[in-house]
Image (cartoon, rainbow, N blue to C red):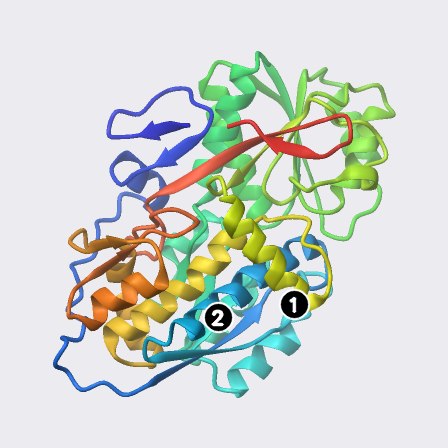
Amino acid sequence: MSVFTRSRRSSFLGVVAVAGASAMILAGCAGTSEPAETSAGPTEEREALTLSIGTVLPQTGSLAYLGPPEEAGVGLAVAEINEADKGITVEVEYGDSGDTDNKAYETTVPRLLGNGVQALIGAASSGVTKLFLDQAVGAGVITFSPANTSPDFTTWDDDNLYWRTAPSDLLQGEVLGNLIAEDGHKALGIIYLNDAYGTGLEAALSETFTATGGEVVASESYNLGDTNFSAQVSSILAENPDAIAVIGFEETATIVPSFVNSGFDGANFYFVDGNISQWGADMPVSIEGSKGTQPGPVLSDDFQERLSAQWLEQDGSELVDFNYAAESYDAVVLLALAALAANSSDPGDIAGALAEVSGGSGDGEKCESFADCADIILDGGTADYDGYSGGVAFDEAGDPTEATIGIFQYGADNIHTRVN
């Protein structure tokens, strides 16, 4: 794992982006907000707080495989916050975001807003969040995504009500572009989903790979819901790429075989967070040797075990993927800590304290659990939560300025393991 400091490296594999150069990458050079004077002193009278959240996470649609780890992360955080008994109770109502095709969010979001939630956790898809974010902002409710990576949210007119624990695709695209170059590839083909997520990541990847001296020989888009990719496959293969990046979701299981069956080597694909799934038998061709990137640090065995137990209790099934589980867990913890710091369950007050409890103010006391951070706040101090997704340290745009991008490689069983 490499560290980003003010002196940027031209090539790297795993990355921890730390405030400095990374802040410029993720937030368009935005400065850090002034510390909000929100923490209630130990002598301030406190009433028991209730925080009501609703999830807008994918139970159906093209990102449905992300739903279980994200909902498990939410459920585990809620359970552990309530068990800690620190003066705040979190209530959660689960809802389906679907995707931009089936539009499940059109039912979920109005229901949750009508039920008076103070925060929405979701969506996973940047494209879906874009379709309801203004509605949530208009209702004065926080939208906190564990997985949105589109750079567009950095400058969204959100009245300080949009936050995310996932880093912008400007960082993931840079990591992926350097990875492909360091693997010795010179000619890259890209096939990408034509939405906010796909176009943003394609642009960041292309810029980085070209800067390494490589050439993007072909880049072809497709639309959500497409089932035939023969035109894109033919166009890309005609340019003789030695590597192909696939930026998309579940349709990857159709796209990749189309390339392999046309003669492309299954070991030379590169995937991203939207499709770095444990494909197994769901991928009908071998992708042994192919790689992909995924935001998020290495998860401890203990955390994975707690997530698995939580999901078994919630859903009665085994948790297979852990993508964005940590970011979902941390989103709930940060909201609860911000409510404590503000001594309020009002969404505007909570939003005003989120940067502080994440370490964005730069003057808090480090802590790594909800209970420990809550004790600091209740004693009149300023908590700086470093969670399972990392340090976060929000800037004034609600973007994390610390992030880790992991690199994964597929084995003979089409199951990936982390290599950096």
Q: Residues within 10 Å of mark 1 (few under 14, many from 20)?
A: few
Q: Is residue 169 above or below residue 231?
A: below
Asked if residue 155 lies left or right of residue 202, the reply is: left
Q: Position of residue 332 (x, y in %)?
A: 44, 66
Q: Position of residue 386 (x, y in %)?
A: 33, 51
Residue at numbered disc 2: 78
| Quadrant location of the N terminus in the rendered image | top left
In terms of sequence position, does the residue under pointer 2 or pointer 1 come before the other? 2
Residue 313: image tag: 1
Q: Is residue 400 visible?
A: yes
Nearest-to-viewer mark from 2 and 1: 1
Q: Is residue 257 above or below residue 42?
A: above
Q: Position of residue 203 (x, y in %)?
A: 52, 35
Q: Position of residue 173 (x, y in %)?
A: 50, 34
At horizontal 79% and vertical 20% (from top left) the residue drawn is 264
At horizontal 32% and vertical 44% (from top left) the residue drawn is 28
